[in-house]
Image (cartoon, rainbow, N blue to C red):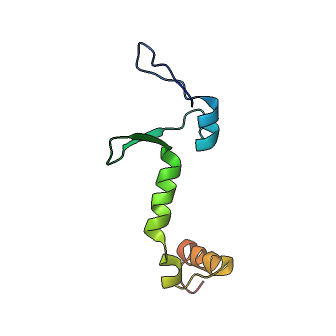
Amino acid sequence: MNLAKISANGQITVPVEIRRLLGLKSGDKILFLQKSNGDIVINNASAQAIYKAQRAFAGVAEEIGIYDEDDAQKLVNEVRYGKGK
């Protein structure tokens, strides 16, 4: 169990063990989520944004024909330099 104290300004120091588990570093933002049972959970907001983006883009690469790094580089070149160049 880890305990944190709230300052007069409403600030807390996240215990080092929790920072390590969440991969938090100075300047990161944390996300507070309330579960249906009322429990509050904290997460690394940056990591949550990445997970959300990964879920949103799941399967898109295959749909547009990108299967490996060479396919990705071809797409980048097309966007940068125009199709057929």
Residue 52: where, in percent of width, then height?
45, 59
Residue 35: give x, y in percent of width and height.
Answer: 36, 47
Q: Quadrant of the C terminus?
A: bottom right
The residue at the point 47 percent across, 70 percent down is 57
Is residue 81 shown above or below 52? Answer: below
Displayed quadrant of residue 17: top right
Which residue is painted at 33% across and 41% down in the image? 38
**Residue most extreme to the top:** 8
Spot occupied by residue 72 in the image (x, y as percentages of width and height): 61, 76
Q: Is residue 67 left or right of residue 34?
A: right
Q: Is residue 1 left or right of residue 11?
A: right
Q: Quadrant of residue 1?
A: top right
Q: Nearer the viewer, residue 82 or 55?
A: 55
For residue 39, side relative to residue 82 (left or right): left
Q: Can you say whether 32 is above or below 69 in the image? A: above
Q: Residue at x 54, y 85 (%)?
A: 65
Q: Residue at (48%, 72%) from the top-left corner?
A: 58
Front-most of 69 and 1? Answer: 1
Where does the image place residue 83, in percent across and percent down from the top left?
53, 83
Choose between 82 and 74: the one closer to the eye. Answer: 74
The answer to which quarter of the image holds residue 14 is top right
Q: Is residue 46 above or below residue 10?
A: below
